[in-house]
Amino acid sequence: MQIRPATPADHDALWEMLRPVFRAGDTYAIDPEISREAALAYWCAEHPYVAVEGNVPLGTFYIRRNQQGGGAHVCNGGYITARGAEGKGVARAMLGFSLEEAKRLGFEAMQFNFVLATNTRAIATWERAGFAEIGRIPQAFKTATGSCDALILHRFL
Amino acid sequence: MQIRPATPADHDALWEMLRPVFRAGDTYAIDPEISREAALAYWCAEHPYVAVEGNVPLGTFYIRRNQQGGGAHVCNGGYITARGAEGKGVARAMLGFSLEEAKRLGFEAMQFNFVLATNTRAIATWERAGFAEIGRIPQAFKTATGSCDALILHRFL
């Protein structure tokens, strides 16, 4: 598995990975109807990456400033594993890479603003990687059947 | 004091209020060098308002979705009182108006993502208005002399 910065040549592959996740609308707080162009602009705004094996995309993530000005030393990240690439350690590899890369880019901490409390597997992975829950937004996300809380996770780099 | 939606005709007045606050860079997590155009685009993205007395602008605030998709029922707000208009209850009037207006717009909760822990006066105002601290980001904001935490405040509408 190789992890490298994504370029415009990766946009088709990125969109193939983003589309099902955004369209499902059950993990990311993104408009499920978001256009390809808007989705790629969102994902690739600052530092997008792709994980590949040969020519097969396995996952993608981004790193970007979570705030501007006096808050620009804290970054945010988002991660998506390609359908069919689950269970190969792709998410863990991307997380490990992103923590190193974020530090190299000069960030001092990483923050996830909106992790669904029901996403227990991802939360366990992040807590093992040193993230701490620093906040909990009540009833932050509406689902077909109700609503769930969202957690805010943070780690110094 | 009248509070009403801001229009493009208010842009000069808005910028006069935003500029000193953004340029100072010590309360909002905004690039202190932000351009007028980018600042107005940021402030007026969804629902900008202005508080005036006659033709004199006293303050401005915005309401907007804090997340998209399944998180779009929670709004975010930002408030700036004009220089020289402090101590007249402008901030409190804008907050009260914005809570009613946000509910009218269909939002179910309001969240502030980044309140400097040193901004004790604003925090006290918001807590009196029913906001609860739901998170605290350690060393979230860099100042000339060090860094301070940022609070996340939340209130159901």
Image (cartoon, coloured by chain):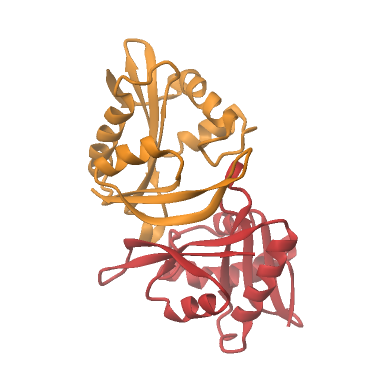
Chain colours: A orange, B red
Q: Residue furthest top?
A: A54
Q: Residue at x 30, y 34 (%)?
A: A95
Does residue B152 appear to the left or right of B39 in the view shown? left
Residue B102 or residue B108, whichever sits in front: B108
Q: Is residue B67 visible?
A: no
Q: Position of residue B17 (x, y in %)?
A: 58, 73
Q: Position of residue A101 (x, y in %)?
A: 26, 37
Residue A44 sits above or below residue B117 on the image: above
Residue B9 sits above or below residue A132 on the image: below
* Quarter occupied by the N terminus of chain B: bottom right
Does residue A20 appear to the left or right of A7 in the view shown? right
Residue B1 sits above or below residue A89 on the image: below
Q: Residue at x 26, y 47 (%)?
A: A106
Q: Residue at x 57, y 70 (%)?
A: B79
* Quarter occupied by the C terminus of chain B: bottom right
Q: Residue at x 45, y 45 (%)?
A: A117
| Image-quadrant location for residue A4 | top left
| Image-quadrant location for residue A33 | top right
Residue A34 or residue A122, whichever sits in front: A122
Q: Residue furthest front?
A: A145
Q: Position of residue B70 (x, y in %)?
A: 59, 43
Q: Residue furthest bottom?
A: B87
Q: Is residue A33 visible?
A: yes
Does residue A68 appear to the left or right of B101 in the view shown? left
